[in-house]
C-alpha cells in the first residue's frame, strides 16, 4: 500500500461522563484517518461512537489524551481558535439537518464562507451556487430552508459543509433520516468528495450497508476500538 | 466581512420575527415615553416654580442681619456669662452702600446689582387699613432684573421714576381698598411717617402674598419713610450668570463685605426641598417603568434564544465564536431598543403636547411643560442603555450554548 498522508490522529483519547455516575465512555482511542479516506465509525448504541465524533470535531474539549488535525496539536487550544479551525477545516453534516429556517438555502450555504471571509460576497455566492449545482438542488437555492423536503435539506447541509473546502467532513448519522433513494444519493456524493476531491469523511452510522460500502470502518464497543477495518459478511448482515 | 455576517443574521432574525420585535419594542416605547413625559412634567414644573421665585428675589441678596448680643467673655477658659441675649441691631442700614454696590458691580461674575430700601407700610383709605411692605427701588433697574413690567395691569412702570409722589401697588391692595389708577392712597410707615401718594401703576403677579402686600416707590421716598438719609440702603440684590451655581458666588461675594450674603436657595429652602422631593418621586417612578421595559426585552430575547438554540449550536459548529453569537443577539436587542426608544420619544412628545394644552387655572395658567432637548437626549440614551443591559445577559447565555449538548439530543 502506498504511504498515505495522515489528516487526523488521536493518541490515547479517553472521556468520562459524570452524570448520573462516573462512567468511562471512551477508553484509550488511538487511530489515524488519511487524506481522501471515506471512514465510518460503527458500533451499538452507547458504544461511544457519537461521543468520539464530537471529541474529534473540536466542539467537545473535555477529554484526556491528544488530538492532531493536519499535524497540528488541537488539544489545549482556546475556544476562539477552535471556532476558527472548525470554520476553515471541518464541515459538519447531522442527522437532523439543522439549517437556519429563516434563511434561504443559498444563504445557509454561504454563511460559513462569509464568516471565513476569504472570498468576497459575490464570489461566495457563486461558489455556493456551484456547490448546490453539484448536489443537484440549484433550482431550490432561493427557497427558505424550511420549505424543502428532508432529502433536499440534507443536500443543502452537505453543500454548507463543503463551502469552505474543509480538509475533513464529519457526519453524525447523515442518512439516519433519509429514505433509501436519498441515502444512495448522499452516499454517492460522499464517495465523490473523498475520491475526487481528496477530502476526508468521518461518518458515524448504524447503517451497515452504508458502512460496508465505505473505504474503512472502525467499530467501537464499550468505548474501545474493537476493529480497525471491520469486514462485513455480505451473506449475513 | 465577518461583522457584516453577524449583522446580516441579526437583521434576518428581526425581520422574520416582526411580532416579537414589536412587542419588545413596545415595552421600551412605553418605558421611554413615560420616562420622558414624567421628567418633562417635573422639569417644567420646577422651572415654573423657580420663575415664581425669581419674580421678586434675585440670585443673591446682601443685607444686614439682626445680631444677637455676644457673651461678655468669649474666652473659653473662663466662665461665659450671657445676660439676656437679645437683638442688638439698632439699624438695618448698610454703611456706605454706594461703594459696596459699585464694588459688587465690578465683579466679573455679577450680571446686575441693584439697591433696595424696604420698609413696613400700612395702606390706608378712610378707616380701612392693610399691612404690607413697601420697596424703594430704581424702577428701571428693578424691571431689568425682575421683569416687573410684564405684570402691570394698569399704568406703567415708566411713570414711577422721577415721580417722588408716585406709587405702584399690588392688585389685591387696590381691590380691597377699592382704588384705581391715579387715585390717592395714604401710606403710613412703621416709623410714623404719613404720606399721601398717587397710584401710577397696579400689578398682578398671581401670587396673593405679593399682590396684597407689596408696593413700589422711589428710593428717596422710601428713605423718607424710614427717616434715613440718602445713603441708606437695606438690601442689595445681585444677579449672576447661573442661578444653579449661586453657592460659589456667595462665597466670593462674602469676601467683599461683612454683611450677610444669602443666595436664593437658602432663602427658598422650603421650595427647593419640595422640588427635590417631587423630582425624586418622579424619577423613581419613571426608572421603575424603564426597568419593567428592560425586563420585557430580557424576556423576549431569552425565549428567542431558547427557541433558536439549534441555530446557535449550528452557528457555533460551523465556526462562529462565542463573541459572534453575543454580537448577533446584542445587535437584535439594540435594534429592538432603537425602534422602541424612537417610538417612545414620539409618544412622549404627544403626551407633552397634550399636557401643554391643559389649562390648570390660577397663576399657573396652562400646564408648565415644554419640549426640552436635554430630556429627549437623556431618554434616548437611557432607552438604549437599558436595552443593551437587558440584551447582554441573554446574549451571553446564548454564547455559552454547548453545541455538543444540543446535537446529542
Image (cartoon, coloured by chain):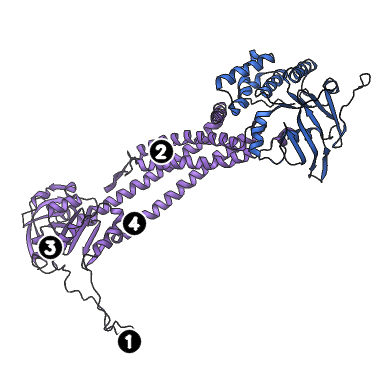
Chain colours: A blue, B purple
Mark 2 neighbour class, 10 Å CA radius: few under 14, some 14 to 19, many 20 or more:
many
Mark 3 — residue?
B98
Mark 2 — residue?
B348
Contact between labelled residues 2 and 3, with CB atoms less than 8 Å apart: no
Which residue is more in the foreground, B407 or B88? B407
Instruction: State the CA–CA distance, disc 3 to disc 4.
Output: 32 Å
Mark 3 neighbour class, 10 Å CA radius: few under 14, some 14 to 19, many 20 or more:
some
Among numbered discs 3 and 1, the one appearing first in the sequence: 1
Instruction: State the CA–CA distance, disc 3 to disc 2.
Output: 52 Å
> Which residue is at 11% across, 57% downward?
B217
Callout 2: chain: B
Q: Is residue A45 left or right of residue B312?
A: right
Q: Is residue A178 left or right of residue B160?
A: right
Q: Position of residue B226 (x, y in %)?
A: 12, 67
Q: Position of residue A6 (x, y in %)?
A: 77, 29
Mark 1 — residue?
B79
Mark 1 neighbour class, 10 Å CA radius: few under 14, some 14 to 19, many 20 or more:
few
> Which residue is at 29% across, 57% downward?
B246
Per the image, label 4 sits on a secondary structure element best described as helix
Mark 3 vs mark 2: give the one in front: 3
Amino acid at each position: 500500500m502506498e504511504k498515505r498522508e495522515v489528516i487526523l490522529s488521536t493518541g490515547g483519547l479517553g472521556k468520562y461522563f459524570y452524570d448520573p455516575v462516573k462512567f468511562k465512555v471512551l477508553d484509550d482511542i488511538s487511530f489515524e484517518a488519511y487524506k481522501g479516506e471515506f471512514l465510518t465509525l460503527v458500533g451499538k448504541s452507547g458504544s461511544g461512537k457519537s461521543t468520539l465524533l464530537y471529541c474529534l470535531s473540536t466542539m467537545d474539549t473535555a477529554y484526556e489524551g491528544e488530538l492532531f488535525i493536519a499535524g497540528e496539536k488541537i488539544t489545549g487550544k482556546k475556544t476562539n481558535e477552535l471556532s476558527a479551525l472548525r470554520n476553515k477545516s471541518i464541515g459538519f453534516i447531522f442527522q437532523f439537518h439543522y439549517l437556519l429556517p429563516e434563511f434561504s438555502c443559498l444563504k445557509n450555504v454561504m454563511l460559513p464562507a462569509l464568516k471565513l471571509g476569504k472570498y468576497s460576497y459575490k464570489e461566495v455566492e457563486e461558489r455556493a451556487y456551484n456547490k448546490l449545482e453539484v448536489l443537484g438542488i440549484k433550482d431550490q437555492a432561493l427557497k427558505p430552508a424550511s420549505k424543502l423536503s428532508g432529502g433536499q435539506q440534507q443536500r443543502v447541509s452537505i453543500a454548507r459543509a463543503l463551502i469552505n473546502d474543509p480538509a475533513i467532513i464529519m457526519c453524525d448519522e447523515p442518512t439516519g433520516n433519509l429514505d433509501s433513494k436519498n441515502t444512495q444519493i448522499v452516499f454517492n456524493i460522499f464517495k465523490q468528495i473523498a475520491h475526487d476531491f481528496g477530502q476526508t469523511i468521518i461518518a458515524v452510522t448504524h447503517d451497515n450497508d452504508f458502512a460496508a460500502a465505505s473505504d474503512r470502518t472502525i467499530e467501537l464497543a464499550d468505548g474501545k476500538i474493537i476493529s480497525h477495518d471491520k469486514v462485513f459478511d455480505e451473506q449475513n448482515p | 466581512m465577518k461583522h457584516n455576517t453577524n449583522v446580516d443574521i441579526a437583521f434576518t432574525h428581526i425581520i422574520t420575527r416582526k411580532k416579537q420585535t414589536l412587542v419588545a419594542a413596545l415595552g421600551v416605547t412605553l418605558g421611554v415615553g413615560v420616562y420622558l413625559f414624567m421628567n418633562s412634567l417635573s422639569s417644567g414644573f420646577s422651572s415654573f416654580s423657580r420663575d415664581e421665585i425669581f419674580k421678586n428675589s434675585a440670585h443673591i441678596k446682601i443685607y444686614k442681619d439682626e445680631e444677637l448680643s455676644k457673651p461678655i467673655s468669649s474666652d473659653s477658659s473662663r466662665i461665659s456669662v450671657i445676660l439676656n441675649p437679645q437683638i442688638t441691631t439698632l439699624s438695618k442700614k448698610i454703611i456706605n452702600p454706594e461703594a459696596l454696590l459699585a464694588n459688587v458691580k465690578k465683579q466679573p461674575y455679577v450680571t446686575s446689582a441693584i439697591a433696595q430700601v424696604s420698609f413696613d407700610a400700612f395702606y390706608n383709605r378712610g378707616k380701612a387699613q392693610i399691612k404690607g411692605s413697601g420697596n424703594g427701588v430704581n424702577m428701571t433697574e428693578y424691571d431689568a432684573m425682575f421683569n416687573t413690567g410684564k405684570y402691570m395691569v394698569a399704568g406703567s412702570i415708566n411713570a414711577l421714576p422721577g415721580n417722588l409722589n408716585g406709587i405702584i401697588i399690588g392688585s389685591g391692595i387696590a381691590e380691597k381698598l377699592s382704588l384705581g389708577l391715579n387715585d390717592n392712597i395714604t401710606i403710613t410707615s412703621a416709623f410714623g411717617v404719613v404720606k399721601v401718594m398717587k397710584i401710577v401703576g397696579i400689578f398682578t403677579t398671581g401670587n396673593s402674598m405679593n399682590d396684597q402686600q407689596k408696593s413700589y416707590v422711589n428710593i428717596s421716598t422710601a428713605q423718607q419713610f424710614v427717616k434715613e438719609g440718602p445713603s441708606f440702603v437695606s438690601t442689595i440684590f445681585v444677579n449672576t450668570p447661573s442661578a444653579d451655581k449661586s453657592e460659589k458666588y456667595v462665597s466670593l461675594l462674602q469676601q467683599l463685605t461683612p454683611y450677610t450674603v444669602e443666595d436664593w436657595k437658602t432663602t427658598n429652602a422650603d421650595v427647593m426641598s419640595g422640588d427635590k422631593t417631587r423630582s425624586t418621586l418622579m424619577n423613581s417612578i419613571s426608572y421603575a417603568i424603564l426597568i419593567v421595559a428592560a425586563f420585557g426585552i430580557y424576556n423576549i430575547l431569552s425565549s428567542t434564544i431558547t427557541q433558536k438554540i439549534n441555530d446557535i449550536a449550528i452557528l457555533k459548529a460551523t465556526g462562529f465564536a462565542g463573541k459572534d453569537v453575543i454580537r448577533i443577539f446584542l445587535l437584535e436587542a439594540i435594534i429592538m431598543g432603537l425602534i422602541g426608544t424612537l417610538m417612545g420619544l414620539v409618544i412622549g412628545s404627544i403626551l407633552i403636547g397634550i399636557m401643554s394644552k391643559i389649562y390648570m387655572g390660577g397663576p399657573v395658567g396652562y400646564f408648565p411643560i415644554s419640549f426640552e432637548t436635554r430630556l429627549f437626549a437623556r431618554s434616548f440614551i437611557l432607552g438604549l442603555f437599558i436595552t443593551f443591559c437587558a440584551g447582554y445577559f441573554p446574549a451571553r447565555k446564548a454564547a455559552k450554548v454547548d453545541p455538543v449538548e444540543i446535537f446529542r439530543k
